[in-house]
Image (cartoon, rainbow, N blue to C red):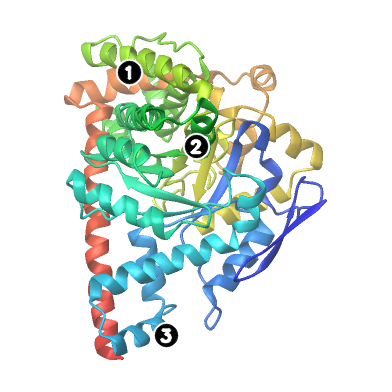
C-alpha cells in the first residue's frame, strides 16, 4: 500500500515496505520498528546549471531514499553562492530589508521548502521526514540563544523539523529551556565530539523533559495529557566523527616514526582510521545505558580516573531520570552520526563513517557524495542481504583487526560486514572500542600530555568558530549580491 501526501511543492509516493523501493534506495536498510539506520542528506543538493534545487532534491529523495535533510550556515551559504536564491534577493532589495533580515528569511524559506518535500515521509514516520535548521553560532549567551531556538522552531511549525542547537558552553541549559518552554522544541544537538559532550547535552535534554512534565502537572493537566504532550517530542544528538581521525591519525604517524618496537608498531598501525568509530561505539553504549537500561561496561578502565568516575555516576543518574519519565511516553534520544564524509586526504573507504554505525536508535547525515556511495553499495545487495543488514546491530560489533587503509578500499566494507564467525574463520582478530581507545590513550595521547576529550573540546570550538565565520561570510555574500543586482 502506498501513502500519498500532497504538499505545496510536490506529491511523493511513500512505500510502507521496502518491496517497491528502487534498488538504489538507502531506505532498504531502514528499520522503523527500532529506529534503525535512518539516513539523511547533509545539505542542499548540487544542481546542473538551470535546474531548481527543489526539483533536484525530489529526484534524490525518490532515487536514493534519504529520510530527511540537515542544514547549517555553511550549507546555506553554498546554496546562496550557487545563485539559487538570486531571484529572491532582487525582490528583497526592492523592499529595503536589512541584510540580517534577508539572511534569516531566506534560510528559513529554504529549510521549510525542503521540509515540505519530505512531508509524506514525516506523515508516515514521526521520527523521519525532518529537516534541521541551525541556530546562529554567533549567539553564545543563554538568553539570546534560547530566543533564536524558539524563533526557528515557530517558523518551522507545520512541517517535520529539528532545530539544531550548537554545542556551545550554554548548550545544556539552552536545550533544557527550549524543551521545557513553549512551544516545545524538537532539538538536534550538534557539534558534539566527545563522550563528555554527549553526556552534558543528554543531561540538558532530560532536564528539559522533566521540567516540562512538572510544568504541565502544575498547570493541572492529567497524566494522559502530559503523556500526549511529551510523546510528541523527538530529538537527535549529532556526534561528529571524521574530524577526530584527522586529528589523531597524524599523531599515530608520529608515534610510528619514533617507535622501533615491531609489535607495538603493528598495533599502532591498526589504530589509524579507527579512533572516531571506537569513540562513537562507546558513546552508543552510553546511549544504551541511559535510554535502554543496558548496564554500562568499562573493561579497560577508561573511566577509572576522577573525571571518568563522575561520568559513570552521571550515566547512572540519567538512566534513573529517563526511567522516571517512561510513564509519560518519552522517547530515547537518537544518536546521529554527523560529519560522516571521508575527506580527500583520508585513504579510506567512502563508507568508513557509515557502515560501522548501523543499528537501532542510530541515524546518519550523509554529504551528497557519500549518499551516492551508499546508494551504489545498497544497489548491489539482494533483498535477503538488505534485510539481514537492516536487522544487524553493527554498532555493537568490534572492528576488524586489519589496516583501515586496506586496498582496494572497498575490501574494508566487505570484511567489516562479514559475520564475526566468518572473520574468525579467516583469522581476522577483533578490535573492540575499549581496546582501541585504551591503546591510543596509553601509547599516543598520554605521552604527549593530551587526551581525546581535550582534543574534542578543541574541535568543537573550531567548529563553532567556523560556523560563526561562515554566517558572517553569508551576510557578506548577500551584501555583495545585492550590490551587483
- Secondary structure under tag 1 reads loop
Across and down, in percent, residue 387 comes to: 75, 36
Which tag, 1 or 2, sits closer to the chain's start? 2
- Secondary structure under tag 3 reads helix
Q: Which residue is mark 2?
A: 229
Which tag, 3 or 2, sits closer to the chain's start? 3
- Residue 388 falls in image quadrant: top right
Q: Name the residue at 40% across, 32% down.
A: 216
Across and down, in percent, residue 430 comes to: 54, 19
Is 226 above or below relative to 165? above
Q: Name the residue at 22% across, 74% down.
A: 476
The alpha-carbon separation of the residues under discs 3 and 2 comes to 40 Å
Left or right of 217: which side holds 135?
A: left
Q: Which residue is mark 1?
A: 261
Choose mark 3 or mark 2, whichever is in front. 2
Q: Residues within 10 Å of mark 3 (few under 14, many from 20)?
A: few
Is 325 above or below relative to 466? above
Q: Which residue is mark 3?
A: 87
Q: Name the residue at 46% across, 24% down.
A: 287
Amino acid at each position: 500500500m502506498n501513502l500519498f501526501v500532497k504538499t505545496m511543492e510536490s506529491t511523493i509516493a511513500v512505500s510502507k515496505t521496502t518491496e517497491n523501493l528502487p534498488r538504489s534506495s538507502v531506505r532498504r536498510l531502514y528499520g522503523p520498528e527500532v529506529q534503525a539506520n535512518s539516513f539523511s542528506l547533509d545539505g542542499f543538493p548540487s544542481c546542473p546549471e538551470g535546474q531548481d534545487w527543489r526539483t533536484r532534491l525530489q529526484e534524490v529523495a525518490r532515487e536514493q531514499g534519504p529520510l530527511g535533510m540537515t542544514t547549517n550556515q555553511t550549507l546555506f551559504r553554498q546554496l546562496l553562492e550557487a545563485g539559487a536564491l538570486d531571484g529572491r534577493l532582487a525582490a528583497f532589495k526592492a523592499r529595503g530589508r536589512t541584510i540580517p533580515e534577508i539572511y534569516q528569511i531566506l534560510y528559513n524559506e529554504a529549510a521549510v521548502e525542503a521540509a515540505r518535500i519530505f512531508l509524506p515521509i514525516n506523515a508516515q514516520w514521526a521520527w523521519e521526514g525532518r529537516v534541521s535548521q541551525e541556530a546562529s553560532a554567533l549567539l553564545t549567551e543563554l538568553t539570546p540563544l534560547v530566543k533564536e531556538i524558539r524563533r526557528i522552531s515557530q517558523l518551522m511549525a507545520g512541517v517535520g523539523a529539528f532545530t539544531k542547537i550548537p554545542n556551545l558552553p550554554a548548550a545544556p541549559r539552552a536545550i533544557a529551556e527550549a524543551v521545557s518552554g513553549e512551544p516545545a522544541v524538537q532539538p538536534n544537538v550538534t557539534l558534539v565530539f566527545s563522550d563528555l559532550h554527549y553526556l552534558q547535552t543528554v543531561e540538558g535534554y532530560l532536564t528539559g523533559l522533566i521540567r516540562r512534565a512538572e510544568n504541565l502537572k502544575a498547570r493541572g493537566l492529567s497524566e494522559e495529557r502530559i503523556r500526549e504532550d511529551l510523546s510528541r517530542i523527538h530529538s537527535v544528538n549529532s556526534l561528529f566523527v571524521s574530524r577526530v581521525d584527522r586529528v589523531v591519525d597524524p599523531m599515530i604517524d608520529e608515534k610510528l616514526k619514533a617507535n622501533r618496537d615491531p609489535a607495538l608498531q603493528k598495533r599502532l598501525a591498526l589504530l589509524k582510521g579507527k579512533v572516531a568509530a571506537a569513540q562513537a561505539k562507546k558513546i552508543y553504549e552510553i546511549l544504551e545505558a541511559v535510554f535502554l537500561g543496558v548496564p554500562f561496561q568499562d573493561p579497560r578502565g577508561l573511566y577509572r580516573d576522577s573525571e571518568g568516575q563522575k561520568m559513570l555516576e552521571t550515566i547512572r543518574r540519567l538512566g534513573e531520570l529517563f526511567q522516571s519519565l517512561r510513564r509519560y511516553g518519552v522517547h530515547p534520544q537518537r544518536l546521529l552520526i554527523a560529519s560522516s564524509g571521508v575527506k580527500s586526504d583520508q585513504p579510506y573507504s567512502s563508507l568508513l563513517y557509515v557502515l560501522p554505525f548501523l543499528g537501532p536508535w542510530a541515524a546518519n547525515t550523509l554529504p551528497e557524495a557519500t549518499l551516492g556511495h551508499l546508494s551504489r553499495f545498497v544497489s548491489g545487495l539482494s533483498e535477503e542481504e538488505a534485510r539481514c543488514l537492516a536487522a544487524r546491530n553493527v554498532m555493537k560489533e568490534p572492528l576488524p583487526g586489519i589496516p583501515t587503509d586496506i586496498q582496494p578500499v572497498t575490501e574494508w566494507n566487505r570484511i567489516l560486514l562479514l559475520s564475526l564467525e566468518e572473520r574468525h574463520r579467516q583469522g581476522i582478530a577483533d578490535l573492540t572500542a575499549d581496546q582501541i581507545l585504551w591503546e591510543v590513550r596509553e601509547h599516543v595521547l598520554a605521552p604527549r600530555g593530551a587526551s581525546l576529550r581535550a582534543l574534542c573540546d578543541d574541535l568543537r570550538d573550531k567548529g563553532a568558530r567556523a560556523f560563526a565565520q561562515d554566517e558572517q561570510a553569508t551576510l557578506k555574500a548577500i551584501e555583495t549580491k545585492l550590490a551587483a543586482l
